[in-house]
């Protein structure tokens, strides 16, 4: 989401630490712990700091897992959640569900045909679409609106075809 720093120069990213191996359950747990620890640490150091959570593929599952275990005091500080190619759209996977308050701030991005997030998806190639400008811009606009105090409505559960 480097494009976000052009619009919001004070924005900083953090690469969540998890191995992304073939052991998705363990990786999700490792990532969940890292997300919660990072937000807790940052919130203690900068009590007025606000957050956006962004996840792609297994990273989206990590965000679900973190949200499900998020300390209640941190939830109001999370202004936007943007997920791409979210495997939890087709299987709960046992990682937990975002709390209702975060569901209201969620933008799910699923490319039509992506078998990772689209129940009717038949192939993997659409799962690689999310680096394209229309998908990136969609996430940036959602986050920007939330941080400017004009949040967009949550958008969940559907698939899209976006072109450049």
Image (cartoon, rainbow, N blue to C red):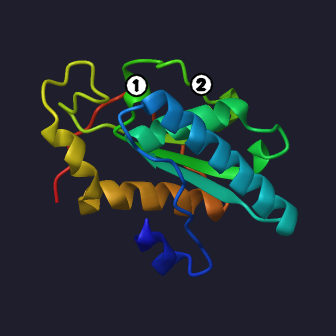
**In the foreground, 81 or 152:** 81
Label 1's element?
A: helix
Return the x and y of residue 124 as percentages of the image width and height.
16, 35
Residue 105 visible to an observer of this rendering: no
Q: Secondary structure at mark 2?
A: loop
Residue drawn at (55%, 40%), measured in percent from left and top?
A: 63
Q: Nearer the viewer, residue 50 or 57?
A: 57
The part of the image, by quadrant, that contains residue 48 is bottom right
| Callouts 2 and 1 close, C-beta under 8 Å | no
Name the residue: 23% across, 41% down.
127
Determine which quarter of the picture holds residue 9.
bottom right
Q: Residue at x 41, y 39 (%)?
A: 58
Task: Answer yes or no: is residue 147 visible.
Answer: yes
Image quadrant containing the N terminus = bottom left
Q: CA distance from mark 2 to mark 1?
A: 11 Å
User: Residue 89 has which mark?
Assistant: 1
Nearest the eye: 141 or 122 = 122
Q: Tell me if 83 is positioned left or right of 130 in this view.
A: right
Instruction: Tell me which residue sits at (62%, 30%) in the image.
Output: 98
Within 10 Å of disc 1 (Cα), the crowding (few <14, some 14-19, many 20+) is some
106 left or right, relative to 78: left
**Location of residue 104 in the rendering, given as x and y in whole percent from the top left corner:** 62, 36
The disc label shown at residue 97, or none: 2
């Amino acid at each position: 989401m480097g494009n976000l720093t052009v619009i919001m120069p004070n924005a900083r990213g953090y690469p969540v630490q998890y191995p992304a191996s073939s052991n998705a359950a363990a990786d999700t747990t490792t990532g969940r712990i890292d997300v919660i620890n990072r937000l807790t640490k940052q919130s203690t150091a900068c009590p007025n700091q606000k957050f956006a959570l962004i996840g792609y593929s297994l990273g989206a599952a990590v965000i679900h897992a973190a949200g499900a275990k998020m300390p209640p005091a941190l939830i109001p500080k999370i202004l936007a959640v943007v997920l791409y190619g979210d495997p939890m759209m087709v299987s709960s996977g046992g990682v937990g569900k975002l709390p209702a308050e975060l569901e209201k701030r969620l933008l799910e991005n699923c490319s039509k045909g992506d078998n990772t997030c689209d129940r009717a998806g038949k192939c993997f190639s659409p799962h690689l679409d999310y680096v394209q400008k229309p998908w990136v811009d969609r996430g940036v606009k959602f986050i920007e609106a939330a941080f400017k105090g004009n949040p967009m409505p949550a958008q969940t559960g559907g698939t899209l075809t976006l072109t450049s």
